[in-house]
Each structure stands twice: as structure tokens, then as C-alpha cells.
Image (spheres, rainbow, N blue to C red):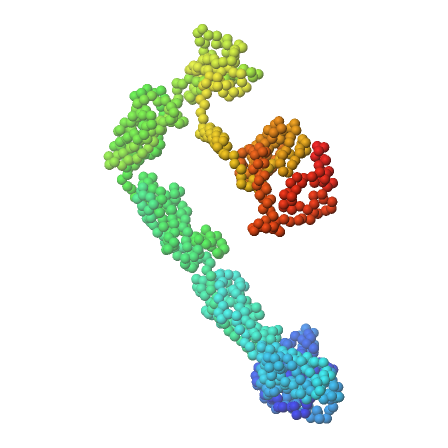
Amino acid sequence: MAPARATRPASGALRPQLLLTLAILTFTCDACKKVILHVPSKLDAEKFVGRVNLKECFQSANLIHSSDPDFQILEDGSVYTTNAVLSSEERSFSILLSNTENQEEKKILVLLQHQTKVLKKRHSKEKVLRRAKRRWAPIPCSMQENSLGPFPLFLQQIQSDTAQNYTIFYSIRGPGVDREPKNLFYVERDTGNLFCTRPVDREEYESFELIAFATTPDGYTPELPLPLVIRIEDENDNYPIFTEKTYVFTISENCRVGSTVGQVCATDKDEPDTMHTRLKYSIIEQLPAYPTLFSMHPTTGVITTSSSQLDRELIDKYQLKIKVQDMDGQYFGLQTTSICIINIDDVNDNLPTFTRTSYVTSVEENTVDVEILRVTVEDKDLMNTANWRANYTILKGNENENFKIVTDPKTNEGILCVVKPLNYEERKQVDLQIVVVNEAPYSKEGSLRSTMSTATVTVNVKNQDEGPECSPRVQTIQTKENVPVGTEIQGYKAYDPETRSSSGIRYKKLSDPKEWVRINENTGSITIFRNLDREAEMIRGGIYNITILASDKDGRSCTGTLGIILQDVNDNGPSIPKHTVVICKTVLSPSADIVAIDPDEPINGPPFDFRLENIPDSDIERTWRLTKINDTAARLFYEKDLPFGTYRISVRVADRHGRSLITPLKVLLCDCVTENDCTLRTDARTGGGDVRLGKWAILAILLGIALLFCILFTLVCGGTGAAKQPKVFPDDLAQQNLIVSNTEAPGDDKICSTDGFTTHTVGSSAQGVCGTMGSGVKNGGQESIEMVKGGHQTLESCRGTGHHHTLDSCRGGHVEVDTCRYTYSEWHNFTQPRLGEKVQLCNQDDKHKHAQDYVLTYNYEGKGSVAGSIGCCSERQEEDGLEFLDHLEPKFRTLAEACIKR
């Protein structure tokens, strides 16, 4: 059973319906034949009438046309009125579909009927026709949003096939019925007619999913619950809205055509993917209006440039009024406008230009760090940006780097300064060429140098009345180093820059390290005052420098340096700097090398001639021999088998011109391998070595002495303390002392007794322990027992005559050692009465009665133990009860036998 169609309402259920209702009936024989639309008698302009499925009729149609100008057909088949339509009669028109490529055409006939007549016609047929059997199945149902009624508005009828056999009551549940929005829908219990009670907004509720029930009066449900979906047909009732009220974009000037400025976006709350939400963007107005520079993509909303004539220097901001319209931009679509502001960003498309092409200025000579000129430029680019700020450069005329030009950051002017003094006598006028560019690179194509602005600056140098000029500041003269004292030679010359003369200038010596010369105050010439020596210590490169002060009558002065170049003469003989040579006699070729030097120039130096200087009454030549190695060195050999020792010889060395010098040498003939060995041994034998102790060696000696005193002090104090300590027994010897027996292996035959604690040694020695102080041993049948007062349970190893036994420390505790030694008899006399007192108290409580918790009987583990049960007081009952040691269990007997065999 299926729900009845809207054309066959139950009797009495029809009400006048003047609101637009859409029902499309497509005949199965031909989809393009006729479509019936139910409409009210009056339709307003731009009103939605209904929707026709164009794709089922003609899939490839690309041209849609209406035969009636009062109606317009969109691409999705939506039918809209273009004008107000008022008619009491039925009206029809055709939708023409065509394909321009293959010239195929099809036609759909649309018939408009008044809804009241259709309902009456259906009602009349209801009385005659019998209801056919239908299925209980869901049929899609829809209603127009924002419907004007009349309400309640009939939607459809649901019926069950079981109504032929039963009395069926219909009911519904779900959103819009018993859930929010409540009471929006209801169904007539007897007829199954479904009604809507008020308008619905699709943007709030897109659809309603209801559940229909068919039940008998007694509650029987012959049908399963039927899901009903009521879809709300969208109406174009929402305006598209821009995401921003005002858009602000920025684009650089002189950009290319098609450059993206920005993108605008709008939203529409109507049903997506319909004509109601198909938006189209456009530019309504541009301010300033001319020329048109921007365009907008109708679908994406992207704004691009349509011209390359954007010039920030002319217009720096544009304002666009933009529009968005739904219905794909149709004239009856809803539209919204917004404002878009486009700022033009500056680029460096204008070069700075000088306001003047030439400048003239002046400056006094010898002045420095002064401003002499300011030049100005014009730049149309945005102020206080890199496109506007100027950089000035001096292209020509500043080869000596006397000038520099910088930019004033506030005014953008170029400041020309003198950084190196000018000389009027050298140049009276300087011509400079200045060029200016921006900090930012030039944006336009082409050669920048050909478009740069340049200016010429003429700088006139003013003359000053100057003092004497020391030029050049360093002057040199030459003279031989052996020139006689009192010789006058040419000195330093300064001059007046105005007259180029040296008259009227006085000279004064400022520095003369060796006081070798005197200076003439009027002429500047110098006189030799002491002998000149080219080989003196302060002479570098054979030049002796003195400083001269030159001044005029007005006190103006200058300072210069006079360098006296000393020409070398052969006034020095070669000498041997090393006066002690070593010959190791034990090497394969015993000899020593002798090297000579000459402070004179090479022309007065090597090759040298080495000779032994013979001393009267000596046999030097037959004992020693010299052989030449090179121009400056010789090798010394001994001819005879000389004993080890020190010998003295003299060597004469002459240069190429025969000037000679005798150098005495001390020759050490040693039993060595290297020269250092011979030198150390010689120093040790002769006492010539000067031995000095460093601070660390002295400190080590002092620390050693202090350590020695500490050891001695410790030994003395320890012995004194041991002598003064009295021999006393502790109060509780049994509990606070450890008796150590250094027997870890079977020794000699021993007989132990518990009452006397005696130990007899036959032919051996016993060992004892006394803490860390060592072991005491007594031989000949008498032994000593060392007792340790172990406050912290630590005993270290002790050594005796035989075995080495060790008791290590217990957890690193502090050790207190009683150094007293006790014999066995002393220890026995002290401990025996105290042990008896302890045993006596073992049976009594505070009232001297038998205490149950003192005497305890313990069960032994295992079988056959001869020891039996033991308690804390078993020793008192059997004073000699050690016989069980003779009847040990097998495992203990085996251990005893092993010890005896050992």
C-alpha cells in the first residue's frame, strides 16, 4: 500500500489552497510531452513557479527558450515569472530545447492549473473511483519554505492496505511532531492526511524525518513503522553577504597587466549547488573613474589589473564599489555591495635630480673637517623611503681624497666636506663632478648611468700666510763613518711656501740619540761632534736619524727628519763570538767548528783567513791544526794524543783586505758524545756550575721536613699514651669484647674445658690479636690472649709465627682499641664470677621468681642430634657438658677428620 497522491484527498479534507504548489507529472510514454504545474491565481514578478527536469527530455541541450515572455527558464529547469501573472483560466507555454551543434530540437509543454480546481476535481473523482491496492512504502514529500498557506497546508495522504480488513488509526512521530519544532506536522487519525501548521525556514531545517504508524483500535500494528522524509524546497530568500565590509589591498605601481590585486569572497545561506547560491561578482564603480585599471573575475572574485598605467605619483589610492549577485547574476537575483580600497605601493621609478647643474664654493687651505657646500635634489617617489633617500658620489676630481660627500637624513641634501687639507701653492682650484642615486635600485629597464643626474662643483682654494714647510719631511745625506770630528756637512732644508726660499728660517735639533752632531741655527748644516760608527748598537740599516725643528720669525714651525747614511769603511776585524769550543775525544772524528763574523759590509768582510797564533815557548802548531770549511768557518783538530782537560789557544782571523783580529779560545777536550755532556761534567768537576733551586724545589723540601716532624710527633705521642693507660677490665667483658683465636686450621693437640677456659699448647706457639696494633706471641708453652674493646666492631689483621689470620672491619665503623694485653689467668678471674651472676639472673624476673620467657626449650631440626634441646641457661646445668663434641653428626665428623689430617 502506498500513500495516496495529492490529487485524491479524502472526502471533506479539501480546503481552498491559493499558495503556489508544485507537482510535476511526467507521462511515462514521453518525458517531453507535458508537465503540469499547480499555481495560485496570482503570481508576482520574479516568483518561483516550479522546476522541470530538462535532462530527462534532452540531455545535450545547450540552448533553452520559453515561448511565453512572462516566464523564464534557467539551466537547472527552474521556472520563474518575469512579470506579474493574473489569470483565472488555465495557461500553458512551451519550453524549447535545442542543440546548436547538431541542430536537434525538442519541446516540453507546461500546463499551469489553479490548485482549487484540481482539488475539487480530485474530490469528485473520490466519490466514484474505488481505492486501488497500494503498498505501505515511503514516498518523498516536499514543501516550499516560507509558504504563505493557507494553513494547515495539506502535504500528502498515507494509507495502509490493511484498512480493507481493519479499522486503522494513523499517527506520526519525530522532529516537528513531538520533538522541536513541536506541533509543526500532524496527521488525521482516520484518513491519514498529513498537514503542516506553519511556514518553515529551510536554512533552519533542511528536512524532517518522521515515522508513521498504522494501528488498530485495540493496539495491534499490522504494518511496520513507515519512515517519511519531508524535504523543504529552497526559496531564494537570503542575500549573498561579503565576508568583509571593506576590503583593503595593495599593489605596486607600474605592475604588469593581469597582476593579482586581491580576492573577495561572499557567502549565501540558501541551498548549495543551486541557482540560489550561484554567485557572480562584478565591479560597479571605480573612483577615480578614469582610466579603468581593474577587472574582477565573475566566479572567483579575484581582482586583477587591466592596465599598466598605475602611477603612485599621480594617484596613490583607488576605491572600487563591488557587487555580488546570486541566481548566476540574473537581474532578478539578490545582490549585495561592498567597498574595496586599493593602495598603490611606491617603487623607485623616479631618479633624484639636482636642482642646479653647477655649484661654486671656496675653502681656505690647510683646513680640515669643514662643510663647504650643500646640494639639493628632487625626487617624486615616496618621502623617507629607500626610493627617495639619496646617495651622493664624487665621480671626478677627488683623486687625492681631499673631499667627501654625505647625505643629510632629514633634508636629503648632499653635504660636501673637506677631510684632507688643501694646499694653495699646489692647486688653487678643484673641479668636482658629483652624481646622485637612490638607496633602492632603479626599477625601470635600461642603463642607469645614462639617466643619472650629475652636477659640477668648483672649489676655490684660498691662500693663507703659512709658516715654514718641511718638505719632504724626511731628507737624507751621505757621509763616511770615519769622517773626522769637526767636519761640516749639508743639513736639513725647510722653505717658505710663499717665497719658496729658506732665508729667515732657524733650525733646532730635537733629537740626537748619540749626540754625534751639532746643527747650524741659521743654515741647518750639521757638524760632526763625535766619531761616527756605522756598527753602533742603535744604527739600523746604516742610517742615523736626527729630528730637526724649523721655525720662522713669527714662531710658526715644522718638523722634519734628517737621515745620515753612514758609508762603511773597513774598521773592524773578524771575530769569533764563541770563545769556548768542545772536542769530544771519544767520537769517530774528534774536532770542533769555529765560525767568525765581521760587522762591516760584505765588501769588507769574507772570505776569512784563519790562523793559529803561536805563543812563545809553546808547541801550538804541532799540537793543533786548522782546516778551512767555507768563507766564514774553520775546523780545529788536535795532532797529538792529548789527555782530557782544558787548553787555551789564540786564533787570528783576517778579512779579504787583510784586517785581522786575534780571538783567544778555551778548548775543552772531553770524554763525551755531545758538547752538552762535556759542559755539565766540566761544571761538576770544577764547581763552575751555578746551581740554583727554584721556588717549587724549596717548597718540596719544606713539605718533606714538615712531614718528617709529623711522623716523629705521632710516634712519640702514641708511645706516651700506651705507657700511661691503666690496665682495667670493662664492666661487661663477656658482651663488649671479642676473644680472637687465630686458629683456622688444626694445630697441635688441645684440650678445651668450659669451666676453666684453658688451652694447652705442646711444642708450638700461640697467636693473639689486639686490634690494629699487631699481635703478641709468647713461646714455650705460655700464650697471651689479646682482648679488644670493640665499640664499633672492627679488627684488622694480625701476624704471628705460623699462619696469617684476618678479621676485617665491620661496615667501616670507627675502631677503638684497648692496647692492654691480658694473660689467661687474669681474664679467667675477671669473667668467671660475672658469668655466674648472669646465669643466675637468667631464671628470675623482677620479683626473683622463675621467668618463663627466660628459660626456653628449643626443638632441634633433624634426627639423631646428640646435643638435644638447648636454652639460654643450659650451660649452668651442665658445667662440663662439652662431651657432645665427641659425638657429632656425620657431616661435622667429616669436617673434624679433615682438619685433623691437615
Residue 200 image position (x, y, % from top left)? 59, 81
Q: Residue at x 46, y 20 (%)?
A: 689
On-image quarter of the N terminus: bottom right
Q: Residue at x 31, y 47 (%)?
A: 362
Residue 36 image position (x, y, % from top left)? 67, 85
Q: Is residue 642 left or right of residue 839?
A: left
Please, is residue 33 above or below residue 639 in the view?
below
Q: Is residue 91 left or right of residue 394?
A: right
Please, is residue 124 above or below residue 433 in the view?
below
Q: Is residue 515 left or right of residue 853?
A: left
Outermost residue on the top side: it is 617
Residue 13 image position (x, y, % from top left)? 65, 90
Query: Does residue 277 show up?
Result: yes
Please, is residue 368 above or below residue 634 in the view?
below
Query: Does residue 290 show up?
Result: no
Residue 75, image quadrant:
bottom right
Residue 380, image quadrant:
bottom left
